[in-house]
Amino acid sequence: MMLRAREQRRENDRNKEKEVVMQPSIWGRLPDELLERIIALLPLRTILALRPTCRRFSCLLSSPAFLSLLHAHNSLAFLLLSHPQFSHRCLPLYDPAADGWRSVPLPPSSTSGSASPSSLLLLSAASGLLLFALGRSSLLVANLLTNASKVLPLPTYSAAPSSAALVSLPSRSNSTHGYKIFLPCASDDDVFVYDSASVAWTRFPGFEPVLGRRNPHQGGAFFDGSLYFTTPEPFSTVGFDLRNGAWDVGVAPPMPEDLAFVRLVGGCSGSGEDHLYLVGGVGRDGISRSLKLWELVGRKEERKGRAWEEIGRLPEMMCRKFMSVCYHNYSHVNCLWHEGLVCICCTTWPEVLFFKVSRGTWHWLPRCPMLQEKWSCGFRWFSFVPDLFALV
């Protein structure tokens, strides 16, 4: 009996080693719709490698029906790390599915003669698009998945931009979508908004408490059609409507008491519903003793019914580590939304603290192995979700 079982295992191993070949005639008889459904299940890099093999495959990525299938099956998301010491020809990204790191090449336009490598700065990311500053004269919008990019001349050349917000504007159907760029003016308190639909910049009056030098965090959190900002102390929330350029000082209820620092994070749930979160250090005399997370609840039309509802509190030991990391210099703290996670980062620390909203749990993302030990500051994180629908 044991000998028979051993022989059976050997036979199974030999069968596994045999190469399984799909007859071309079978593939040729498959209906187009079924074949496209099968191809849509392949990894994106495999689909891109198929394009040169025949005219039919090369046209797939321009087919609305196939793009809809691809959008439904491919929802990979990565955390992208930027650091001044990295090579400007690639950037490292963390793949949660594989729990590993890899590097992604930048588009040729970002490494060619349009700017020196030292002047290339990643400013923002949204729905598969990355926004770079190319010196003091232009911006670069790039889709790494399609290897497409566009250089946008800046409306003013007073200084290289250090902050900007890239906002994706997806349509309700699975079709291509555009974007807007919110750019603070370096010389005064005005702002510029670029619309990919009109291919033009529009200048709007600014709001000094948000755009002043006392407030270095001018990127904004996108929520419900507007960018939301916080003012310096006394902390409050201000909204900027991207459609008409109007500022709204009563867009959110008063913030919780005893806050030492605040950050806003805008996110979209799996059902497509927008959410706005408030990350705050709680303490007195500018020293945080704890860190909490709130969510804005209530409808925008019913402002009196809106409130900040606490949804999470950082455990004491993790809080001690985080506060020691930033040395109570909260200007180094940045926050972002990443596929159901509220990520809290520090430019002086290579790890990421994140809160999983669905489970209400806190975790640390370890240090990237591509980092050298002597690199101690300049860490900036971005959420990167590859998207074929995002046009530059």
Image (spheres, grey):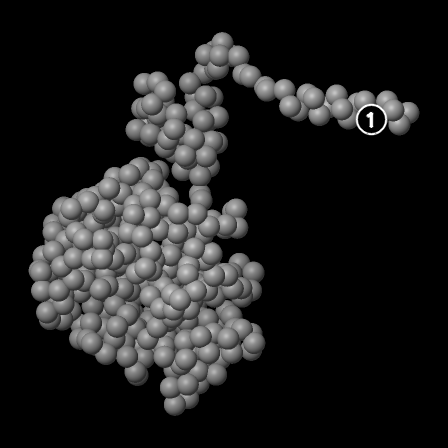
Q: Residue furthest right?
A: 1
Is residue 318 placed above or below 23 in the rendered structure?
below
Is residue 51 placed above or below 309 in the rendered structure?
above
User: To which quarter of the image does residue 162 belong?
Assistant: bottom left
User: To which quarter of the image does residue 225 belong?
Assistant: bottom left
- Binning the other alpha carbons within 10 Å of mark 1 as few (below 14), some (14 to 19) or many (20 upward) gives few
Residue drawn 13% across and 59% down?
136
Is residue 172 visible to us here? no
Q: Locate residue 224, reporting x and y percent.
A: 32, 58
Three-letter code, disc 1? Arg
Residue drawn 36% across and 20% down?
53
Is residue 35 visible to us here? yes
Q: Locate residue 246, reporting x and y percent.
A: 18, 65
Q: Residue furthest bottom?
A: 285
What is the secondary structure assignment of the residue under circle 1? helix
Residue drawn 38% across and 28% down?
49
Q: Locate residue 198, reporting x and y percent.
A: 14, 46
Circle 1 residue: 6
